Image (cartoon, rainbow, N blue to C red):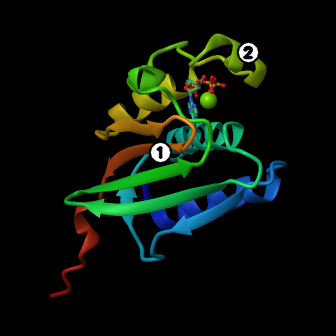
Amino acid sequence: DWVEFTEFFSNIIDRFEMSKEQNVSFKRAYSKKSRFMEIDEDKITQVLYNIISNALKYSPEGGTITYRLRERADMLEISISDQGIGIPKENVDKIFDRFYRVEKARSRRMGGTGLGLAIAKEMIKAHGGDIWAKSEEGKGTTIYFTLPLGKEQEDDWE
Ligand code: ATP
Ligand code: MG
């Protein structure tokens, strides 16, 4: 379905902001202009839930989660950054593998199955996008993903 992504994204962030129990602030670092795209709303909602839940789970007390949207040619790049524990360099690409969890002890304490990001990757790939992470231990993690922008973005009125 065709979706105005900026509002769709903002609504999901609002829901998390209202229900979160952690002392973590949210920063929306994107312009409020319309961005139309054809997506499966349920699936992309699930992707965002996974990523934002992880960001909250691994955020420190008083941390900030930053949400960004950036147009890159015909794609929209969505990114979610936290200031949490981060992921060791050699493991960053493995977090998208099924059942992979960094450090079993720390993960057991945190709960979860290790499937969230593997499912997210499948859904993003099915939409013609890509997903990756950048992380620095002790500093934080950013998850990026891209989705194709609608072709009629620039309305050509005749
Ligand atoms: P599930 O999502 O199924 O409940 P999960 O959160 O452990 O379980 P994924 O979402 O796939 O699984 O994440 C895989 C692993 O990547 C996590 O167990 C964690 O070790 C690491 N990880 C993911 N996001 C972050 C993050 N924002 N900061 C630090 N580590 C992360
Ligand atoms: Mg998860």
Of the 4 image quadrants, the one containing the C terminus is bottom left
- The image position of residue 77, as x and y in percent, is 35, 54
Place residue 60 in its image quadrant.
top right
Position of residue 78 in the picture relative to residue 158 (left or right): right
Position of residue 115 in the picture relative to residue 21 (left or right): left
- Residue drawn at point x = 39 percent, y = 21 percent: 90
Nearer-N-terminus badge (2/1) = 2
- Residue drawn at point x = 38 percent, y = 67 percent: 35
Label 1 sits on residue: 142
- The image position of residue 96, as x and y in percent, is 44, 24
Residue 4 appearing in the image: no
Farthest-out residue, right: 21
Farthest-out residue, left: 158
- Residue drawn at point x = 38 percent, y = 25 percent: 93
- The image position of residue 62, as x and y in percent, is 75, 55
The number of discs equals: 2
- In which of the image's four quarters is ligand 2 placed? top right
Callout 2 amino acid: Arg
Tag 1's secondary structure? strand
Farthest-out residue, bottom: 158
Badge 1: residue crowd in 10 Å (few <14, some 14–19, many ≥20): many
Place residue 153 in its image quadrant.
bottom left
Closer to us: 22 or 117:
22
- Residue drawn at point x = 49 percent, y = 14 percent: 98
- The image position of residue 123, as x and y in percent, is 43, 32
Position of residue 12 in the picture relative to residue 3 (left or right): right
Farthest-out residue, front: 138
Position of residue 103 in the picture relative to residue 78 (left or right): right
Callout 1 amino acid: Thr
Asked if 93 appears above or below 66 in the picture, the reply is above
Label 2 sits on residue: 108
